[in-house]
Amino acid sequence: MTSAVQIVRVADGQAVPYEIQIGAGLLSRAAELIATALGDLPRSVHIVSDTTLAPLYAPAVRESLESAGAKVFLHTIPLGESEKSWQRLEALTDAILANGIERSDALIALGGGVVGDITGLAGALLLRGVSVVQVPTSVLAQVDSSVGGKTAIDTRHGKNLIGAFYSPRLVLCDLSVLSSLPVRELRCGFAEIIKYGLAFDADFFAWLEDKAAILSNPKDSAFAEVLGVAVQKSCQHKARIVADDARDTTGKRALLNLGHTFAHALETTLGHDSQALKHGEAVGLGLVLAARLSESLGMAQAIAEPVMRLNQRLGLPVALSDIGLDASHHDKIVQAMRYDKKTAGGEIHFVLLQAIGQAVFPCTAEQQAVREVLA
Ligand SMILES: NC(=O)c1ccc[n+]([C@@H]2O[C@H](COP(=O)([O-])OP(=O)(O)OC[C@H]3O[C@@H](n4cnc5c(N)ncnc54)[C@H](O)[C@@H]3O)[C@@H](O)[C@H]2O)c1
């Protein structure tokens, strides 16, 4: 694994610009890197993690911070999307307040997107805003959820409906932690990585095709290095997009939702807590369906086949049958799309493609055209 640290700067206009640092072994340098980003080491630091990750990775972060003189509190939350709840947010903020926190203190989100989203929101709310450092441990969190300042919890009315735009002060993508990530979670991250190539960067898409054999084999000696490059490239795209449209108002940030209208509808159809379909898998299949719809509307040619091939090589689904759905589910899927947050005036607005590397938004399609690509 490369020991060099790559830095991507994010100037999203929300707050102070911040850095994404990408490299191996960053956890044990947490104190030094946080002190540099914040101008000083906070007196107290609250690490938030989940029950899988806290025992694996909190000790290294704690040791770095304590040996530099910071007081460290560890808050461990249970696993799963259901933890992005009012109840967990209340319990977490209450525990942090009980430990004591000042405006100059910091929260560290050490985990995947679930930990990152709830910790980011807690950071926005506590004392009207304390510093948040994201230390994403899943590929999905490293290339997507930790960057861009979207924080949220879910409600019974839907996912991510209560939240705030609140940027972190630093993102530390330690590539060493990815070695413990289950293969299925790894593939979920690949879907978001493919998305960046497909939406914005044909050369990156071709590079992923070229490196697919390595990425599909974590035992390959080049795996860690290639994954590191893919994370870096993806973060560059995310940083560029959020700098252009931090608050998701101009349509540019919406391009990051390529494949997601289909993905959310598939997740709704199977149930959001379904073990049969993870979010990243739904995004992977959503990319195929978006490419097929772009072709069937005459917007693009010969793009679906390469996406399907790349998905297959990286272990992602390419057809409804791969996730246990069939024609009897088409009505439910189309119905679920009508509740997509990009729906406006009753019309579903898709992110579609003019070519590989050229996503466009908003695009509309007749229900019949959507049904045809599901088949
Ligand atoms: N804020 C945003 O912009 C944004 C963007 C995309 C997704 N999200 C959110 O992110 C969440 C999904 O994130 P996720 O896929 O990281 O899910 P997650 O946080 O549930 O992590 C997935 C699983 O992998 C485990 N894990 C993570 N890193 C590991 C590691 N290094 N070793 C071993 N196990 C590890 C976790 O413990 C968990 O069980 C969703 O809630 C979604 O809404 C937010």
Image (spheres, rainbow, N blue to C red):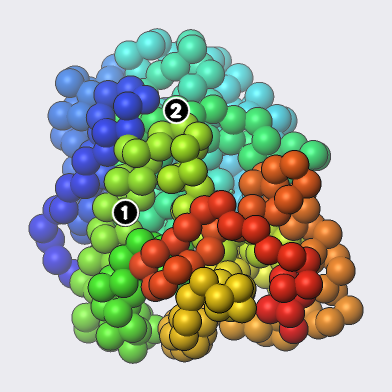
Q: Name the residue under label 2.
A: 166
Q: Which residue is drawn at 30% across and 46% down?
A: 240
Query: Which quadrant is the N terminus positioned in?
Result: bottom left
**Is residue 348 something one can see in this rendering?**
yes
Residue 181's place in the image compared with 25, above or below, is: below
Q: Quadrant of residue 363?
A: bottom right
> Going from the N terminus, do you reach mark 2 or mark 1 first?
2
Q: Which residue is drawn at 78% across and 72% down?
A: 368
Query: Which quadrant is the C terminus positioned in?
Result: bottom right
Q: Name the residue under label 1.
A: 237
**Is residue 193 something one can see in this rendering?**
no
> Quick check: is the Cβ at mark 2 less than 8 Å away from ligand 1?
no
Q: Which mark is residue 179?
A: none
> Quick check: is the Cβ at mark 1 less than 8 Å away from ligand 1?
no
Amino acid type, callout 1: His
Q: Quadrant of residue 267?
A: bottom right
Q: Residue at x 88, y 79 (%)?
A: 328
Give the x, y percent position of residue 187. Answer: 48, 73
Number of residues whose C-alpha sits closer than 10 Å to that of mark 2, classed few (under 14), some (14–19) or many (20 or more):
many
- In the displayed orientation, state which residue is furthest to the left: 4
Alpha carbon separation for disc pair 2 and 1: 19 Å
Q: Which residue is drawn at 45% across and 28% down?
A: 166
Amino acid type, callout 2: Tyr
Q: In the drawing, does residue 298 fall left or right of residue 331?
A: left
Residue 157's place in the image compared with 293, above or below, is: above
Give the x, y percent position of residue 84. Answer: 64, 40
Number of residues whose C-alpha sits closer than 10 Å to that of mark 1, classed few (under 14), some (14–19) or many (20 or more):
many
Give the x, y percent position of residue 138. Answer: 43, 58
Q: Along the line of sight, which residue is nearer the eye, 333 or 192?
A: 333
Residue 50's place in the image compared with 219, above or below, is: above
The local secondary structure at tag 2 comes to: loop
Q: In the drawing, does residue 75 fall left or right of residue 86?
A: left
